[in-house]
Amino acid sequence: MNNSISTTSAGWPTHWPANSFRGGPTALLILAAIGAAILGGVIGVLIFFAAHRPRTMGPQFVVSAIWVQLLVEGAAVIVILIGLPAVSKRSLRELGFYAPRPWQLGVALLGAIAMVIVVEGGASLIQTLTHTKHEQSVVELFKQVIGQPSVMWLFAVFAIVLAPFMEEVIFRIFIFNVGLRWGGFWLGAIVSGLCFGAAHADPYVLIPLALGGMVLCGVYYRTGNAFCSMVSHGLFNAVTVFALIFAPQLAQ
């Protein structure tokens, strides 16, 4: 028996080395990512108020909010991508960063469909059971840029391309793999999904988004490709964004 190999999640993405995701190095990487996110947020907020000093919601507020989120999440992602190979004892390619194959993209498409059903269906069910009509913050923000094409498309690029890349690195490539390494698929998926839902800071859709995050874990786990969960995530966001652009009455 090879004691250098972990038996937990032994087949994903290759055999986990016994010294992968050790408590100390993993905790340090988490703290470094949080520290980078805080620093990025401080810089973003300072630029936000120094340059615009917005007092009310509007297109400029939305642009500034996008840049602040990009700095916060982008800083954390850079730290994670730099430190993850050393902590996981696997290369980024072994963790899924390689060009997806056609069948993997097919799984990504199915994952996007499943995510729409789970998240939108779950949110609709909650509204029906509670007899309420809840408008997500993303809808409120987007309403501020209707009639501003350049800002609308900036919003779309961020939501469909940049946010899925950054959030998948954080919640799937890092958090899910930590849980997967030590407790198997379901522990990793539950922890990753709950963190994903909580990060959107909307208690009303916490559970639907957590379930959607678990779907994304399934896509990543099934394909072994980091870009596939990003594609699923981006397609899911695209449904919302294009509904807001072309059929806003359907995205209330």
Image (cartoon, rainbow, N blue to C red):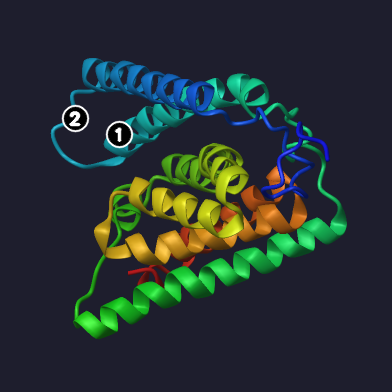
Say few, some or many: other residues with alpha carbon within 10 Å of mark 1 (under 14 / 14 to 19 / 20 or more). Answer: some
Residue found 56% across the figure and 37% down from its top: 174
Residue 88 found in image quarter: top right
The C terminus lies in which quarter of the figure?
bottom left
As drawn, 58 above or below 248: above
Q: Where is residue 121 in the image (x, y as percent from the top left)?
A: 44, 77
Q: Position of residue 239 (x, y in %)?
A: 53, 63
Numbered disc 2: secondary structure: loop
Numbered disc 1: secondary structure: helix
Q: Where is residue 109 in the image (x, y as percent from the top left)?
A: 70, 64
* Left/right of residue 127 with respect to residue 250 in the rendered view: left
Viewer-proximal residue, 15 or 127? 15
Hey, what amino acid is under mark 2?
Answer: Pro
Q: Distance between the residues labelled 1 and 2?
A: 8 Å
Hey, what amino acid is under mark 1?
Answer: Gln
The answer to whether the residues at label 1 and label 2 have Cβ atoms under 8 Å apart is yes
The N terminus lies in which quarter of the figure?
top right
Say few, some or many: other residues with alpha carbon within 10 Å of mark 2 (under 14 / 14 to 19 / 20 or more). Answer: few
Residue found 25% across the figure and 16% down from its top: 46
Which tag, 1 or 2, sits closer to the chain's start? Answer: 2
As drawn, 10 above or below 203: above
Residue found 19% across the figure and 83% down from its top: 131
Q: Which residue is identified by label 1?
A: 60
Q: Where is residue 210 in the image (x, y as percent from the top left)?
A: 43, 60
Q: Which residue is identified by label 2?
A: 54
